[in-house]
Amino acid sequence: FLKKFKKNIRSEATASSIIVLGVDPGTLVTGYGVVARRGNEVRMIDCGSIKNNGETSMPLRLKKIYAGLQTVIEKHHPDEFAIESVFYGKNAQSALKLGHARGVSILAAVEQEIPTTEYSPREVKRAIVGSGAASKEQVAFMVKSLLGITNSKMLHDTSDALAVAICHAHRMTTPTTKHKDWKSYIEAHPERIAGRRLATKTQRHEVFFVGFHFYFSSLCLRVLVVFFFLWRLWYDCVS
């Protein structure tokens, strides 16, 4: 009942806008950013980071990340949750630790029945800067420019989390459906075909027979021309 009540509060509070919580997970520093999208406008609501001591055991670090994100969720009631996926260039140990942080972060959102989406670092950089190879400094600069932030001391973990949130906010209004072949694309977008589509089976049959008749007539004409040429050649030789 409590989850349903919170969900109703969230839907009423965001009737005119959609709130997105973006997270850049890490066992030492987990950045978070909350943005609201209304139409084509995206504005920042809150941002920050959850910091852990390097000497703290891993279970206690994960507990703090989970509790910190739960607090953010209860405060802002986001409609969507977006998180950065694992960067496969990291070594196995770092990827494993990052996976733990991602797991508890996603759990915090799923427990509140918030839809979750994952984006690779290259996807986020491409959406914010325009290049998948952009540096953290470039991402931070664009995030601050887009959201009108003047804080020059913002951590990269926080700006990265805001970048994830902005990326998801824009992706929610941009179709990303991929088609495996041209046939599926044409079926999904008939309006992009030059000319009018043939709507009925009868019309397709009519076009087929007209085309076949034209092709057959053209072939017969060519055969007659060749036959006449050979007959004329034979007649000249005999004469």
Image (cartoon, helix red, strand yellow):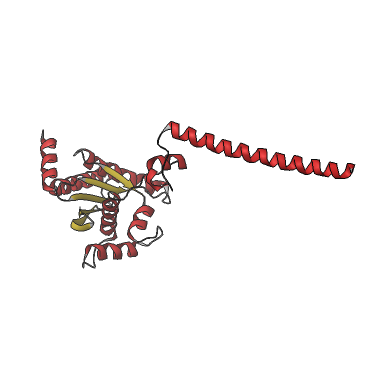
Residue 29: x percent and y percent?
27, 54
Location of the C terminus by quadrant is top right
Q: Is residue 167 above or below residue 181?
A: below
User: Which quadrant is home to the N terminus?
Assistant: top left
Residue at 86 percent across and 45 percent down: it is: 236
Can you say whether 167 is above or below 62 in the image? below
Nearer-the-camera pick, 60 or 185: 185
* Residue 190 percent location from the top left of the image: 39, 43
Q: Is residue 236 above or below residue 162?
A: above
User: How many numbered marks are there?
Assistant: 0
Q: Residue at x 34, y 64 (%)?
A: 138
The answer to which of 16 and 76 lies nearer the viewer is 16
Tell me, yes or no, if residue 87 can be seen here.
Answer: yes
Identify the residue at image location x=25%, y=56%: 162
**Relative horizontal placement of residue 73, taking residue 103 as reference (left or right):** left
Q: Nearer the viewer, residue 188 or 126?
A: 188
Q: Residue 33 in the image: state x and y as whole percent.
A: 22, 54
User: Is there any visible trace of residue 26 in the rendered image?
Assistant: no
What percent of the width, then of the height, locates residue 21? 22, 50
Q: Nearer the viewer, residue 123 or 24?
A: 123
Residue at 34 percent across and 54 percent down: it is: 124
Instruction: Tell which residue pokes out farthest to the front in this image.
Output: 239
Rendered view: 11 above or below 154: above
